[in-house]
Image (tube, helix red, strand yellow):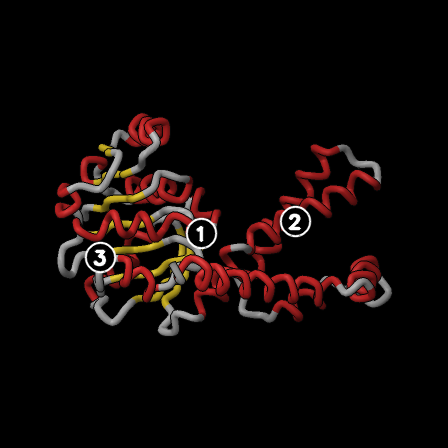
Amino acid sequence: MKVAFVGAGNMASALIGGLIADGVVASDLYAIDPGEVARTQLENKFHIRTGPRPCTKLAEYDAIVLAVKPQIARNAAQALAQYLGAGQLLISISAGVRCADLRRWLNGHDCVVRAMPNTPALIGLGVTGLTGTPGVDESSRHLSSKILGAVGSIMWFADESLLDAVTAVSGSGPGYVFYFIEALQRASELLGLDAKQGRALSVATFVGAAQLAARCDDSMMMLRERVTSKEGTTACAVESFEAHGVKEAIIQGVLAAAARAMAIGEEYGSE
């Protein structure tokens, strides 16, 4: 498996590291980025080859991962278009950028996968939603799964519009978790714990609760109710959350994130 990356940011670095950990040799990976500092960092960390711009060398690779910010996805795709071979897999991890727009920028190329990984991919614990154009056959699906699966679990969606929901739930989700941990840590400090103690307790609680949820099939409501004794401390906290509309605020925040993901697709895809 030979994979080239357009973009040398954190997610590209995570994928490169995950692929190498999975047994892909460094000489089969290549990264393109105009920034010399970014290229040098990848070269030093992973001992891969890099270049400043797309070139005919890309024909050697089974898949090309477009790992750039959505606002520059159009220019990056157009610069890449002339070097794509028929049937060569293009995977985009640019948030909100739609397959139809990618195909248009790539002169009609029809082997395109849109993927939405999240930041826990940096430690191999990500989750990625994927969808593909009609030109993505079983071989390309398998290759996409291998590449994104190198940094965590994957989930395929037949309906591309659901990728905006994936972006809102899991793509942005780590930010929500950090936000809640931040609040929990602040509360611990108000109760007299120092910052180090508060952080350790808050993070460990999230890790443990998430692992418990992952290892059983019970609903989140049932799990919550098991630790919520009548008139106990957890019940008091949950009642306060409900009184302040915390759950509804979280729901509305996720819906706002999904709307923004859709708007990004409209905004940058209209060019």
Q: Amino acid at mark 2?
A: Tyr
> Mark 3 vs mark 1: which is more N-terminal?
3
x, y percent for residue 258: 54, 64
Q: Residue at x 46, y 52 (%)?
A: 118
The CA span between labels 3 and 1 is 22 Å
> Mark 2 vs mark 3: which is more N-terminal?
3
| Nearest to viewer (mark 2 / mark 3) | 3
Q: Nearer the viewer, residue 53 or 89?
A: 53
Local crowd size for mark 1, using a 10 Å CA cut-off: few (<14), some (14–19), many (≥20): many
**Residue, disc 1:** 126
Q: Nearer the viewer, residue 154 or 225?
A: 154
| Nearest to viewer (mark 1 / mark 2) | 2
Local crowd size for mark 3, using a 10 Å CA cut-off: few (<14), some (14–19), many (≥20): many
x, y percent for residue 86: 13, 59
Q: Amino acid at mark 1?
A: Gly
C-beta proximity under 8 Å, tags 3 and 1: no
| Residue 150 visible from this viewpoint | yes
What numbered label is drawn on residue 94? none
Relative to 48, is 68 on the left or the right? Answer: right
x, y percent for residue 101: 33, 63
The CA span between labels 2 and 3 is 36 Å
Callout 3: SS: strand
Relative to 216, is 40 on the left or the right? Answer: left
| Residue 128 visible from this viewpoint | no
Callout 2: SS: helix
Q: Give the position of the C terminus as an image quadrant.
A: bottom left
x, y percent for residue 152: 40, 52
C-beta proximity under 8 Å, tags 2 and 3: no
| Nearest to viewer (mark 3 / mark 1) | 3
What numbered label is drawn on residue 179? 2
**Residue, disc 3:** 89
